[in-house]
Image (cartoon, helix red, strand yellow):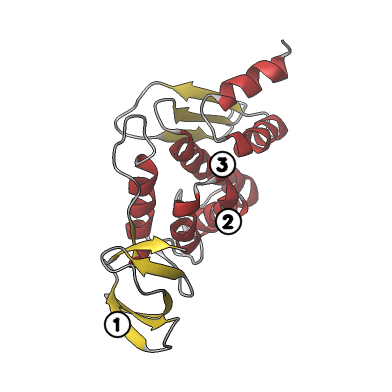
Amino acid sequence: MTTEERYRAILRNHLPAESVGWVYDFLNHYKVHFHVTRERRTKYGDYRWPQPNHLFHEMSVNGDLNPYLFLWVFLHEAAHLETHLKYRDVQPHGHEWQAEYARLLAERLGDFPDDARPLISRYASRVPLSRVIGRRVEEMLHRYDAGAQDAPVLHLDDLPAGSRFRLKRNPSMLFVSVEHRRTRWLCRDEASGRMYVVAGSAEVVLL
């Protein structure tokens, strides 16, 4: 087995299959020293830029994460690397990093599960990034942990405007979300064209 094959095999153990080639190419292009670490309760990942006594990019991601969370964290750290190369001395999670992270998430959106894509797309759609939506994404991705029993739950607030959905408690009607109004959404019933106001916390099935 070649060195490349060995590294790709390691990545396949931790990432969605669609991400392996891109991640390998990213690490190889930037000559990153990459580590899959044990569980760390204080953080999921880490990035260190080159310094006089530390001459290479170094990244790590916790190895106990499920593949989708692993990718989510990897992109977070990859955004730190690219932000450093473009801007050098800026705030770690400032506007520049947020823009890079949003871009990477948008580029790799198809590597995440179908039910998480609308929420990730919403998270990455504008800077500054929303911490509340970011936490929701992590909660949703945690439902893919080994042994997780509950199916992922979507709320209307998780979806962008224009989404087609049914209410979980009343699936007979098919809606399209039209406009966000604080804690509620204005939605159109596709069959009748009538408008309804639906709570953003309502559990929905995305169509």
Q: Which numbered marker is on residue 91?
A: none
Q: Position of residue 45 (x, y in %)?
A: 43, 34
Q: Which quarter of the picture shows residue 154?
A: bottom left
Q: Which numbered marker is on residue 106?
A: 2
The answer to whether residue 24 is left or right of residue 38 is: right
Q: Count residues near mark 2 (Cα–Cα under 10 Å), then give few for <14, some for 14-19, many for 20+.
A: some
Q: Which residue is mark 1?
A: 197
The answer to whether residue 165 is left or right of residue 56 is: left
Between discs 2 and 1, the one toward the N terminus? 2
Amino acid under label 1? Val
Q: Position of residue 11 (x, y in %)?
A: 58, 26
Q: Count residues near mark 3 (Cα–Cα under 10 Å), then give few for <14, some for 14-19, many for 20+.
A: many
Q: Decide if residue 43 is in sight here.
A: yes
Which is in the foreground here, disc 3 or disc 2?
2
* Along the line of sight, the residue nearer the viewer: 34 or 24: 24
Q: How many marks?
A: 3
Q: Which numbered marker is on residue 78?
A: 3
Which is in the foreground here, disc 2 or disc 1?
1
- When the figure is inspected, residue 141 is found, relative to residue 180, above or below; the finding is above
Q: Position of residue 70 (x, y in %)?
A: 47, 35
Q: Decide if residue 88 is in sight here.
A: no
* Along the line of sight, the residue nearer the viewer: 193 or 127: 193
Amino acid under label 3? Ala
- When the figure is inspected, residue 189 is found, relative to residue 1, above or below; the finding is below
Amino acid under label 2? Ala
Q: Count residues near mark 1 (Cα–Cα under 10 Å), then give few for <14, some for 14-19, many for 20+.
A: some
Q: Tag 2's secondary structure?
A: helix
Residue drawn at (53%, 56%), measured in percent from left and top? 102
Report the quarter where the N terminus lies: top right
